[in-house]
Image: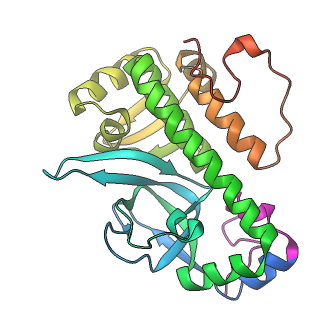
Amino acid sequence: MASLKNPPNGRSNRLLTLLRAEDRERLQWHIEPVVLEYRRPLYDADEPIEFVYFIETGVASLVLTMAKGQAAEVGTIGNEGFVGLPVLLGGDRAPTTSVYVQVPGTGLRMRAEAFGEELERSPPMRATMLRYAHAFFNQVAQSAACATFHSLEQRCCRWMLMTRDRMQSDQFLLTQEFLAMMLGVRRAGVTVAAGALRRAGLIRYTRGEVTIVDRGGLERRACKCYGVSKMQFDRLLGVDLPEVPETSGWRSGAVGGQ
């Protein structure tokens, strides 16, 4: 049994912290800690989902594989959410997408059947999880628009900042393969974008390991989509947000002006 009050690594899944004390108390009897190794599959397309995962550190990638074998990353999950939305939504538990670990870290898992039972038992818990689902689908929509309107370098900055927030560290593993999949470009394009950021003194990037040297500079180069997505999840997670003018591009649903 894993404690949801005092995680041994000092880090926690932000979504779990929103639950009522009685819900966390019940979940403790079902949840176990797991190490999320790079490339570890969390569930496979067309297969029943056995476990749901609450990520503490690291990033999981939601991937859609086309008929000819090409794979595209369509969403990411970090410590702001959980892996296993089809279980929450009560539909077919043999999903069309797969999820695997792209940035290694740690997390908690519980059996999908037990998770479904706890959702039925606690309407407030279900409501919290549905709020996350809404924020996640907004992130997917924001990313699709971002890929259309913003430059490769801006989008590269955005994903590095999002990964940094999820890892709670300025240094993390982020392979060129994953960046290319997130950005929807060839690896050569990632090399060019990362090289420009390195020469500007914003990051160090060696053998797939990123060190953010100047976070403020990286934020200034990123498109406003980073701020939009961060604001939506912070609102979900109960963070006090400043009032932002509608013209800034930081409103929900805005792609951003950069």
Foreground residue among 118 and 160: 118
Foreground residue among 6 and 23: 23
As for residue 4 lying within the magenta part, the answer is yes
The type of colouring in the image is: rainbow
Foreground residue among 86 and 186: 86
Residue 155 in picture, x, y percent from top left: 45, 25
- Overall secondary structure of the magenta section: loop
Answer with the quarter of the image where residue 119 lies: bottom right
Residue under the image location 40 percent in, 65 percent down: 37
Q: Quadrant of the C terminus?
A: top right
Q: Is residue 213 left or right of residue 187?
A: right
Looking at the rendering, the stretch of residues picked out in magenta corresponds to 1-21
Residue under the image location 53 percent in, 21 percent down: 222
Residue extending farthest to the left is 68
Mark yes or no: residue 236 visible: yes
Q: Quadrant of the N terminus?
A: bottom right
Residue 140 in picture, x, y percent from top left: 50, 41
Number of dots carrying numbers: 0
Q: Is residue 213 left or right of residue 231?
A: left
Answer with the quarter of the image where residue 111 lies: bottom right
Answer with the quarter of the image where residue 149 lies: top left
Residue 96 in picture, x, y percent from top left: 34, 61
Residue 78 in picture, x, y percent from top left: 56, 53
Mark yes or no: residue 170 visible: no
Residue extending farthest to the front is 91
In the image, residue 186 sits, relative to residue 149, either above or below, namely: below
Residue under the image location 65 percent in, 28 percent down: 227
Foreground residue among 59 and 11: 59
In the image, residue 198 sits, relative to residue 237, either above or below, namely: above
Residue under the image location 41 percent in, 54 percent down: 62
As for residue 132 lying within the magenta part, the answer is no
